[in-house]
């Protein structure tokens, strides 16, 4: 077996052993189910299906939760192993440092994928079967799961970057919280604040849109809420969808870049590090 | 290209202003075993890290199994290196057998070796237990087992016997002897000097980042010219006086014992003289300078300006 896959497999086994897989799946599943059952009740007479409403609810949930789970999984992946001394022996094996980073990444993203697919899938199947959803809303639901995994992968990569850059686990934990706060909460609040404060004078809608591209969480939000279907109508982002939204391809590319760049940087940092 | 297993040439390493390895040159030939001696902080571990490519040298060159450790070729060469770090750390939630299988895969070693090695280090009964329940000695033995995965050509063992009880220590050295007979090259570090005496072909002494001496014990003894200690047992005070008269270094302990601390070159002549006394001498013991004494000699020699 390939070295990267050996390390990935070990991370997955670790995740099962220490109940990370179970905990993440249960957390996402229970919250998604609650959201789906409660949130989709009043949809009754509107054109949108119950599944459409669920997609909107779930994307708002996962924008908070998925980055959090991803960062918790990843922030100590490298610095923790260095502190415990296990990295030392691992790197004395015929293993390159980028292989360690990539292998861990694949393992952690696999855990996250399982949790998202199963957790959200249960919610989707519960409300979406029968008259609950049509082909289009199922497509939106599939896109939600796929993009949630991508969003998780972004924050796993950011977690590794933190983990490879700092000296101890405590610092890594602090930085992980900071990264979560900035991307998930503060960035949008700041943008909104600026927009309100200067009443569209300086920061035009165009600039505002581009600024949103620089935040992976916003790219994820735009991807899921501003398509051209019922979801966009329901979420009130349809107007944006008409005049201003970016293509789905561009938004996915933004997420991919947010994965590739931090991951490469983490590999480089670990490569230079003296143990 | 040299055939040496390890070749260090004028190797230096510093952390900031702190120079921990200073111009070390050293070679290890195929099938040779060398003990690297020095107190804590002498640079032994740093030297091993350099050989494994875990850190980069500031000066000089290092070649292990014909490759530079930091390079791509060096990474491939690590498949033939077994390494046991000082105070080895494992993931406590894994079982001994799981851990060994993981490392065997990384080293492309046959998985059936895992059970054999667990047997060899006496961990078969604990193989299915989590490592966090292991004692320090068991962890150390597991560490040795992982180092032996994939039939390495070179073993780098950093303080391999710390935490081992006397029985497992003996079986460790028995394993080591068998491996060197099979042609495995060994570099082991230690600060327990008396323990490695007679266990390796050569000893290398490090002090403050400098390799102060390297050679067989006989060579080092010769170079150090430390006095040989001879103890003679006699029957009476009169005999003790007779014996004590034979060399200036004589020290009369009491009426039954005389000690000599003579120069190595004088040793055989003195022994012959004592033997010629015949029945006067009841017993005699000769102690060559211990490794401790040699170590102290070379360490202090370096300190003198």
Image (cartoon, coloured by chain):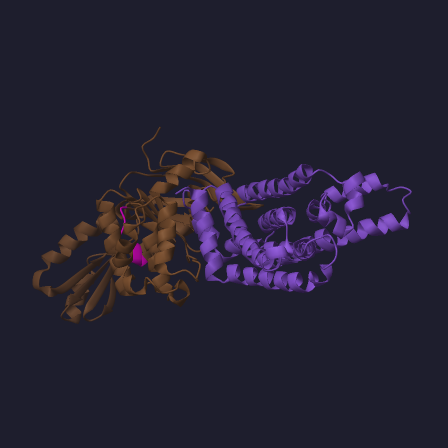
Q: What shade has chain A been given?
A: purple
Identity of the residue furthest to the top in this view: B1
Question: Viewed as shown, does residue A188 lie left or right of B10?
Answer: right
* Any part of residue A257 in sight: yes
Quadrant assignment for the N terminus of chain A = top left
Q: Main secondary structure of the magenta part?
A: loop
Q: Is residue B299 left or right of residue B235?
A: right
* Position in image of residue B65 (x %, y %): 35, 36
> Residue B26: x and y, percent?
37, 39
User: Which residue is at the front of the view, B55 or A238?
Assistant: A238
Check residue B160 for magenta coloring: no
Span highlighted in magenta in the image = B194-201
Image colour for chain B is: brown
Horizontal and vertical percent for residue B277? 10, 59
Q: Residue furthest left?
A: B279
Image quarter for residue A200?
top right
Q: Position of residue B87 (x, y in %)?
A: 42, 58
Q: Quadrant of residue A268?
A: top right
Q: Nearer the viewer, residue B128 or A25?
A: A25
Q: Residue at x 54, y 63 (%)?
A: A23
């Amino acid at each position: 077996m390939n070295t990267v896959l050996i390390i990935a497999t070990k991370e997955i086994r670790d995740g099962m052993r220490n109940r990370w897989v179970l905990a993440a799946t249960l957390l996402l599943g229970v919250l998604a189910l609650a959201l789906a059952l409660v949130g989709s009740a009043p949809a009754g007479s509107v054109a949108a299906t119950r599944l459409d409403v669920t997609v909107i609810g779930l994307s708002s949930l996962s924008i908070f939760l998925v980055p959090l789970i991803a960062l918790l999984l990843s922030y100590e992946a490298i610095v923790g192993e260095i502190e415990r001394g296990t990295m030392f022996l691992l790197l004395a094996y015929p293993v390159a440092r980028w292989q360690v980073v990539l292998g861990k990444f694949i393992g952690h993203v696999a855990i996250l994928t399982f949790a998202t697919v199963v957790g959200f899938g249960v919610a989707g199947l519960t409300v979406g079967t029968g008259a609950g959803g049509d082909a289009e809303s199922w497509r939106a639901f599939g896109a939600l799961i796929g993009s949630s995994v991508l969003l998780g992968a972004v924050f796993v990569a950011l977690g590794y970057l933190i983990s490879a850059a700092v000296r101890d686990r405590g610092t890594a934990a602090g930085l992980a919280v900071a990264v979560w706060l900035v991307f998930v909460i503060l960035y949008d609040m700041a943008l909104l604040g600026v927009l309100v404060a200067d009443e569209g004078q300086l920061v035009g809608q165009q600039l505002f849109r581009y600024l949103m591209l620089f935040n992976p969480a916003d790219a994820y939000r735009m991807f899921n809420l501003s398509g051209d279907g019922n979801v966009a109508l329901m979420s009130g982002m349809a107007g944006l969808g008409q005049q201003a939204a970016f293509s789905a391809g561009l938004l996915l590319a933004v997420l991919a870049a947010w994965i590739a760049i931090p991951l490469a940087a983490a590999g480089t940092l670990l490569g230079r590090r003296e143990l | 290209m040299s055939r040496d297993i390890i070749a260090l040439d004028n190797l230096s390493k510093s952390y900031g202003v702190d120079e921990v390895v200073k111009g070390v040159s050293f070679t290890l030939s195929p099938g040779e075993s060398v003990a690297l001696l020095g107190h804590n902080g002498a640079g032994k571990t740093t030297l091993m890290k350099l050989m494994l490519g875990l850190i980069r040298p500031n000066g000089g060159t290092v070649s292990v199994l014909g490759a530079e450790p930091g390079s791509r070729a060096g990474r491939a060469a690590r498949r033939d290196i077994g390494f046991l770090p000082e105070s080895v750390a494992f993931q406590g939630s894994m079982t001994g057998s799981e851990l060994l299988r993981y490392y065997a895969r990384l080293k492309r070693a046959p998985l059936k070796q895992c059970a054999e090695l667990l047997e060899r280090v006496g961990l078969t009964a604990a193989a299915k237990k989590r490592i966090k329940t292991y004692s320090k000695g068991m962890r150390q033995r597991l560490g040795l087992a992982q180092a032996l995965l994939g039939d390495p050509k070179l073993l780098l063992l950093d303080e391999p016997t710390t935490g081992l009880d006397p029985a497992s220590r003996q079986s460790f050295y028995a394993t080591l002897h068998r491996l060197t007979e099979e042609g495995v090259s060994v570099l082991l570090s230690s600060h327990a000097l008396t323990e490695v005496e007679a266990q390796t072909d050569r000893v290398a002494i490090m002090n403050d980042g400098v390799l102060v001496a390297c050679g067989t014990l006989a060579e080092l003894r010769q170079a150090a010219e430390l006095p040989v200690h001879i103890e003679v047992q006699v029957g009476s005070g009169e005999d003790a006086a007779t014996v004590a008269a034979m060399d200036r270094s004589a020290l009369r302990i009491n009426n039954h014992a005389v000690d000599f601390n003579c120069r190595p070159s004088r040793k055989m002549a003195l022994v012959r003289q004592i033997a010629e006394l015949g029945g006067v001498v009841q017993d005699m013991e000769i102690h060559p300078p211990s490794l401790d004494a040699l170590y102290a000699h070379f360490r202090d020699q370096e300190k003198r300006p």
